[in-house]
Amino acid sequence: MEVDLRGGETRTPAFRTKNPSGKIPVLELEDGTCLAESVAICRYLEALVPEPNLFGATPLETAQIEAVHRQLELELFAHIGAAWVNGPIVAAAGLVKPIEAQRARGEALAHQFYDRLESTLTEQPYMAGDRFTVADISALCLIEFAGALVKLAPKPELTAIAPSPRNSRRGCPYGSARRRNPRAFPSPRARRWRHRPR
């Protein structure tokens, strides 16, 4: 199901019974149980269908994937978020009073992390090693979100991470992730709450 973010639908008492934080995504199961947070939802789905896995097959690989994923959350997502909140859409909608210094700092730090991603993906095919994992999904989503809604796409010269025809040809997960993703989750009988654009 889709919700109206700008209209404040996620902040209504009815929605907060599903997620007290008033945020999306939320996965609502047949029995009415609601699961919030993307990673929690992904872990639930993987527990239902554990193979092929996205979170790690061994204790070491699980820890390595988790470390990379946490770095993406804390060192990229946070900076993209600062640029988003103080940038061209959220601030322009009057939802917050923008702080230009925070927007500029978020953009600068995001570009620094893009350079780091470029170095990583020049040396290895995927974020956390030699196979596609949840870390690649998150990196792809962050990069696409930043480019489409925050005007914060990687610089074109970062050929390992900037979506482009060249990336699609060379098999980079960020240029052709939808074709390369080796896993298709089964569709549980559930409702997924997401943003409904106006």
Image (cartoon, rainbow, N blue to C red):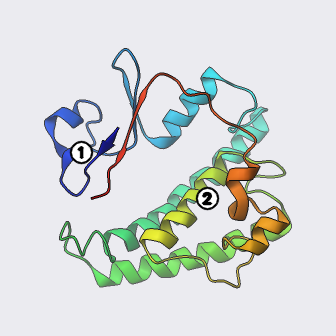
Query: Does 118 sit above or below residue 3?
Result: below
Mark 2 burial class by Cα count in 10 Å: few <14, some 14-19, many 20+: many
Question: Crowding near pointer 1: few (<14 within 10 Å), some, many (20+)?
Answer: many
Residue found farthest to the front: 198
| Viewer-proximal residue among 57 and 150 | 150
* Numbered marks: total: 2
What number is the disc on residue 139?
Answer: 2
Which is closer to the viewer, label 1 or label 2?
1
Q: Position of residue 63 (x, y in %)?
A: 70, 41
The reply to whether residue 34 is in sight is: yes
The image quadrant of residue 103 is bottom left
Q: Nearer the viewer, residue 84 or 186?
A: 186
Q: Amino acid at mark 2?
A: Ala
Residue depicted at 16% across the width and 41% down the height: 12
> Which residue matches tag 1?
10
Viewer-proximal residue, 108 or 45?
A: 45
**Residue located at (56% from left, 36% from top):** 42
- Disc ID at residue 133: none
**Residue 17 quadrant:** top left
The kind of residue on which mark 1 rests is Thr
Closer to the chain start, of discs 1 and 2, is 1
Residue 160: % across, % down = 75, 72
Q: Is residue 48 above or below residue 70?
A: above
The residue at 40%/17% (across/down) is 30
* Image quadrant assignment for residue 49: top right
Q: Secondary structure at mark 2?
A: helix
Which quadrant, please, contains the C terminus? bottom left
In percent of width and height, residue 139 lies at 61, 59
Q: CA separation, marks 1 and 2? A: 25 Å
**Position of 96 compared to 108: left or right?**
left
Q: Residue at x 40, y 42 (%)?
A: 25
Residue 111 drawn above or below residue 197 = below
